[in-house]
Amino acid sequence: MNIDRYIELWNQAGVQVVDVQHHLLPYGHDSIIHEMTTSGLIYTVRGGGLIHVDYNRYRTDRYHLIHGGKGSLLQIDVIEDQLEYYLILYRAHILLSAGTTARLLPDESPLLESQYDLKPIHPVLLQDKISQLRQMWTSPHRLQEMQVRSIFLQIMMEILEQLQSAPISSEPTDLVAQAMSYIQEHYHLPMTIDSLAAKLECSPRHLGRLFRNSEIGQSPSDYLVQFRMSKARELLVQTDLALKDVARSIGYEDVYHFSRMFKKYSGLSPIHYRNQYHQPPTGLNTTSAMSDISIVESLIPRYIDNGSQNKQVSGGSFMMYNWSRRSTVMMLLLSFSLLMSACASPSPSTNAPAVSSGSEQATADTASSRTINHDLGSTKVPVEPTRIVVLEQGFTQTLAALEVKPVGVADDNKPERFPKDTLAYIEGYTSVGTRSEPNLEVIRTLKPDLIIADTSRHSNVYDELSAIAPTIVFKNDTANYEDILASTQNIGEALGKSEATTAMLEEHQKRLNELKQTINPQQSVLIVAADEDETQSFQVRTDQAFHSSFLSAAGLNYALKDEKEVNQLMTTEQLLTMDSDQMLILINEDGPSVLEGQKDNLLWNQLKAVQNGNAHEVELATWSRQRSIPALNHIMDEAAAYFK
């Protein structure tokens, strides 16, 4: 196929989308046979199948695109699991400038009907566009036809760009590149790392690990914010949009929150940045001179260069800004005079000492607040906070144990993961979203007087949280046993519950001493979990993790030592090199049994703990997610039974 001529014809083409279908075929389904009366695109997104287009056969799996022309005979067979695919039928014709249909030369007439296939470089992005097309197709309204045509042309643009740059079928880019492309296309929409990971069908933790280990070297959250800020700088320099409109254009509904984020990442407030670098338009065809301003250069780390450049199609850009003419404003210089009165008569003197209003205010502040030291500094908090937002599950358990009800909790939108006694006590709270991506807008509406956050998860939004309410930050996600003991005491002090906290810790120490008397300290132990993305690998907690370090404090020999990390990814062979006496296997609430899933694994069955019946499946929530002193009190009886 002549790719250049094919693209040239598409530049002159008008299109009519005829049908957009979405199919999910179970394994064993009868063959689908269809004679295509128009051109069509088939895009498989899940499962495996054999697709015949005339005499060509394609062995498909997920993310495979096939184009067929009018009159082609299409046959689809499911060969494994179930096959999910989209079928888009359309007509294309060449238009003259006057809008009439042009005649194709005889040797070019079949070109638009060419048959080809490819593996999209950005498969998730393409799937998202096709899903939008299907949704728009099934939602009739006045602008439906125009919107359907617009989305279809975006899809064809993706295909043509790939044909032009890599005519031969390519392998999809890695998850980091796909995530970056998705962010670059959807930065103006509400987005969390959880929702992004769901699009890519991986866990948020795995996606974060891939980002940090790549050339990007930062979290997906940081990349998203930096990309948004780079777009905000462009809008501030190139347009006269109001700040609230700039904020909304990059995905922020709250202009105050946007302003704080902009200053954090750009060093100037949006207003000062615009005043310093704004380039007023001189006409409709004004071009930007941003490249001459060093501070406007993108702060986004480069990862890949394919698909990330802005493209011009048919003389127009994908993004257009509506220039508004601003009337000339006269700048008035105001002079201020400091009026000093030297002739005012002094009041009669008294023997009473004078107390400054500043001292009175300082005394009042001291009486109404206390200073709490935490991982990111020192913060003044109310003596008796009443509206508390908690962003980590372990901290929430501590509050409930101290009989303090939070107004907001980051519950991952899964309150059932809390222990029943904790959930019963905090009933009536407002969910503020996930622990990894708490919703700052919801937090702000709760008007908290204290926020308790996690060091590893929330340091990057500490300034934003502190702007809402006094915020104290402690390790929890990456905390060990000693860290939790210390943070519990500090949180108790912040709540005005020092005495109750001390009593709780003393009771805990008493129970720990009792546990030490009942277990066999000669045993070695490991805590493992099946990896979400690698079926034959395991996430193994190190001795720095909370529950692992607690078992060490109880006198057991924890088998995996690591001074820096709380977790390591290991294979079964690596587990065998340590071969612990006891093994605790973390199972999610709705997850499958690891012992059942590994029963045919020969290496797994050689593990000492498996052979001796000392491999115990335990709840992930209790033995991993719940990092608090109350949580440990719950599992001590369980631990005594395992390690006696």
Image (tube, rainbow, N blue to C red):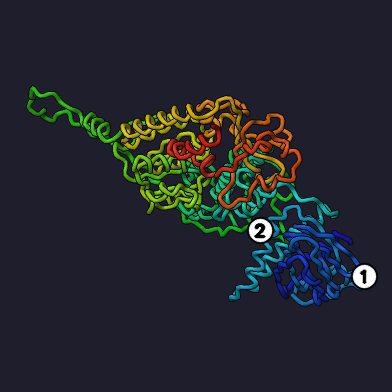
Residue designated by label 1: 107
**Dot 1 crowding, Cα within 10 Å, few <14, some 14–19, many 20+:** few
Residue 307 screen position, x and y as percent:
72, 51
Among numbered discs 1 and 2, the one appearing first in the sequence: 1
Residue 115 screen position, x and y as percent:
86, 65
Residue type indicated by callout 1: Asp
Q: Nearer the viewer, residue 24 or 441?
A: 24
With respect to residue 34, does 641 lie above or below? above
Q: Residue at x 72, y 46 (%)?
A: 174
**Judging from the image, what secondary structure is the residue with disc 1 in?**
loop
Q: Nearer the viewer, residue 302 or 508?
A: 508
Residues at discs 1 and 2 in contact (Cβ within 8 Å): no
Q: How many marks?
A: 2
Residue designated by label 2: 318
> Is residue 522 rendered to the left or right of residue 108?
left
> Is residue 296 rendered to the left or right of residue 155?
left
Q: Is residue 95 visible?
A: no
With respect to residue 342, does 17 lie above or below? below
> Is residue 324 rendered to the left or right of residue 183?
left
User: Distance of mark 1 from mark 2, alpha carbons?
Assistant: 33 Å
Residue type indicated by callout 2: Phe
> Is residue 89 rendered to the left or right of residue 191?
right
**Dot 2 crowding, Cα within 10 Å, few <14, some 14–19, many 20+:** few
Residue 530 screen position, x and y as percent:
65, 43
Residue 618 screen position, x and y as percent:
56, 43
Q: Nearer the viewer, residue 433 or 224?
A: 433
**Judging from the image, what secondary structure is the residue with disc 2 in?**
loop
